[in-house]
Image (cartoon, rainbow, N blue to C red):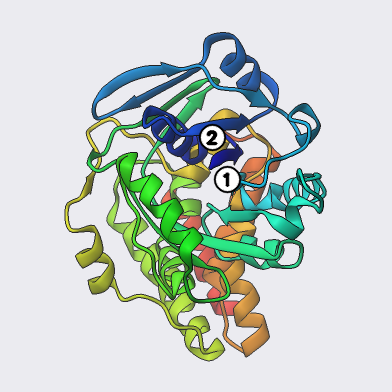
Amino acid sequence: MRYIIIGAGAIGASIGGRLTETGAEVVLVARGAHAQALRSDGLRLTTAHGTSVHRLPVVADPAELGELRSDDVLLLAVKTQDAVAALDAWGDAEVAGGGTAAQRLPVLCVQNGVESERLALRRFARVYGLCVWLPADFLEPGVVSARCAPLTGILHIGLAAGGADARARAIAADLEKAGFEAPVVEDVMRWKHAKLLGNLSNAIQATTGLEPDPAKAALLLRAIREGKAAFEAAGIDYVSEAEQAAARGGKVEPPPGIRGGSSWQSLYRGTGSIEADYLNGEICLLGRLHGVATPVNDVLRQAANIFARESLPPGAMSIADLTALADEAEARA
């Protein structure tokens, strides 16, 4: 199999780099300064085993690869706000022997949140979810760090619509050779919904900074309570905290020096967009569909989007000010 990593950022480059270390064939998809650095200097990937430079094929779009191969696997690792453009571009690509990628090739959704699978299922016939537990840094072009140990990460994999198949097991085998644990599960979206609850903290970290604070923990608990209430109203099942803890069990321990999460890193790099609409915004959507008030998550979503649009530096807001906005929104709800 050849792995085409659509979005070679923190997660995509970590997976692609580790796969290539095992001899797997990997293509990175990137744009701008990051693509230029990857082409000129290679992917500089630091793991718990040290730093390696991987010189891999880098393309911006399918046209640069030409006709895709029937054994290609697409890993969609762009942020969800960029998923539609990527799915459309790659879905229309022709595959050797006839048909398009959307008709014939598997696509793995490697993002936080649960919306990318739905977007992909509208376009692709073979869609898999990947629940990612892989702390990694991507702060400058061409340079990625994923230094957790003893495993680089845990990647639950399964069919987005439920179930598992031989292809999922084959992909999981490649991932496990590359330093990941990759459980093949029948209910991958249960895992992704549970991860979503944890990712409700992304907006808090991005706007108020990395320093731990009891007030940040308290605000997150309020956001999670809304999320659980929305899941219950919508009839959505999710993996318990105990089941997640048992699955991780000290297998992916980050070293000192890991910076912020994915949303914090988006602000740090000044990307101009952030994934809050598909994290806190997912809870808002469910709440509005099922009659559950979600004012805290709506405040977090709005605050994160303002930071991205106005290119504010991560951590520029005090937790007291963010909590006050949440308090006011709850009072109005």
Residue 263 in view, yes or no: yes
Relative to 14, 27 lies left or right? right
Q: Is residue 142 above or below residue 198?
A: above
* CA distance for labels 1 and 2: 8 Å
As drawn, which residue projects farthest toward the front? Answer: 97
Relative to 63, 300 lies left or right? left
- x and y, in percent, of residue 265 in the image: 50, 36
Numbered mark located on residue 77 in the image: 1
- Decide: few, some or many residues near mark 1? Use Cα within 10 Å; few <14, some 14-19, many ≥20: many
Q: Secondary structure at mark 2?
A: loop
- Which residue is found at the position 31% from the left and 76% from the top? 240
Nearest to N terminus: mark 1 or mark 2: 2
On the rendered image, what quadrant is the C terminus found in?
Answer: bottom right
- x and y, in percent, of residue 65 in the image: 73, 30
Relative to 247, 118 lies left or right? right
Name the residue carrying label 2.
9
Mark 2 residue type:
Gly
Report the front residue among 239 and 208: 239
- x and y, in percent, of residue 155 in the image: 39, 54
As drawn, which residue projects farthest toward the top? Answer: 40
- Which residue is found at the position 50% from the left and 84% from the top? 236
Report the front residue among 142 and 93: 93
Q: Marks 1 and 2: CB-CB under 8 Å?
A: yes
